[in-house]
Image: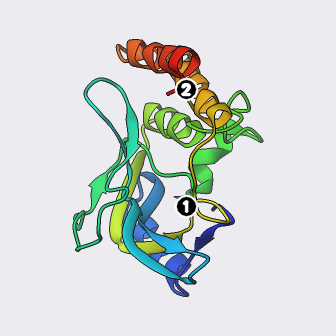
Amino acid sequence: MNPDAFLPSDYISQAIQVMHENPGAAVVSGKLLGYNLQAMKPTGKIDSAGVFRKWYGRWYDRGQGEEDQGQYALIENLPAACGALMCCRIKALQPFGENIFDPDFFLYKEDIELGIRLRKDGWKLIYDPRLFAYHCRGWGGRAEVSYNLRLTAARSEVLLYRKHPERYFLWAYLKLFLVRVFRL
């Protein structure tokens, strides 16, 4: 859980119940809703309803920035869960020892990489909309993302596809090129 995530009082008990309902799940996650820390109120927008991948390889938080109107209301398997808030089964993480998150990832994509390893080990990652919490995306709200952070994110995506080769590696290298050369 990130320090800028806030849970309803019954979140943990509900997450445990979802784990009991899904014995093959390594991770359970729900809908993360935006929260404006300066105004001290929910934004009414979705922050993440699971992490998915576009056809060309770009990973994204489903629903991010959309007004929450009850969409993404089905329980389903996820390709990856947003690392801001994941409830994990200890038994699934034990084989990784102290390195649950791969230490090669300084920032960005470490949650996706963990999800890939867990799924390769036969575990499921479950999205259950009965679980919801709030996420601020940084202590003061996320402003324009700096070049250095965009570069770190692009490097992490290349690293992800180096560790888990897939046809999407071209996307990762193109993204890194665009950030380095055009500072996009």
Q: Earlier in the sequence, mark 1 or mark 2?
A: 1
Name of the residue lying farthest toward the bottom: 9
Q: Amino acid at mark 2?
A: Ala
Residue 4 placed where, x, y %?
Answer: 64, 67
Query: Does 74 sit left or right of 36 as displayed?
Result: left
Q: Amino acid at mark 1?
A: Leu
Give the residue at x 60% y 38%: 108
Q: Which residue is mark 2?
A: 154
Residue 125 placed where, x, y %?
Answer: 41, 50
> Is residue 28 depicted above or below 41 in this figure?
above
At numbered mark 1, what does the secondary structure look like: helix, strand or loop?
loop
Query: Does 31 sit left or right of 15 as displayed?
Result: left
Q: CA distance from mark 1 to mark 2?
A: 22 Å
Count residues near mark 2 (Cα–Cα under 10 Å), then give few for <14, some for 14-19, many for 20+: many
Quarter of the view holding residue 46:
bottom left
Q: Nearer the viewer, residue 146 or 21?
A: 146
Q: Which residue is mark 1?
A: 85
> Is residue 145 depicted above or below 71 in this figure?
above
Name of the residue lying farthest toward the right: 98
Give the residue at x 63% y 62%: 1
Quarter of the view holding residue 183:
top right
At numbered mark 2, what does the secondary structure look like: helix, strand or loop?
helix
Count residues near mark 1 (Cα–Cα under 10 Å), then give few for <14, some for 14-19, many for 20+: many
Name of the residue lying farthest toward the front: 182
Residue 90 placed where, x, y %?
Answer: 62, 55
Query: Does 17 sit left or right of 140 as displayed?
Result: left
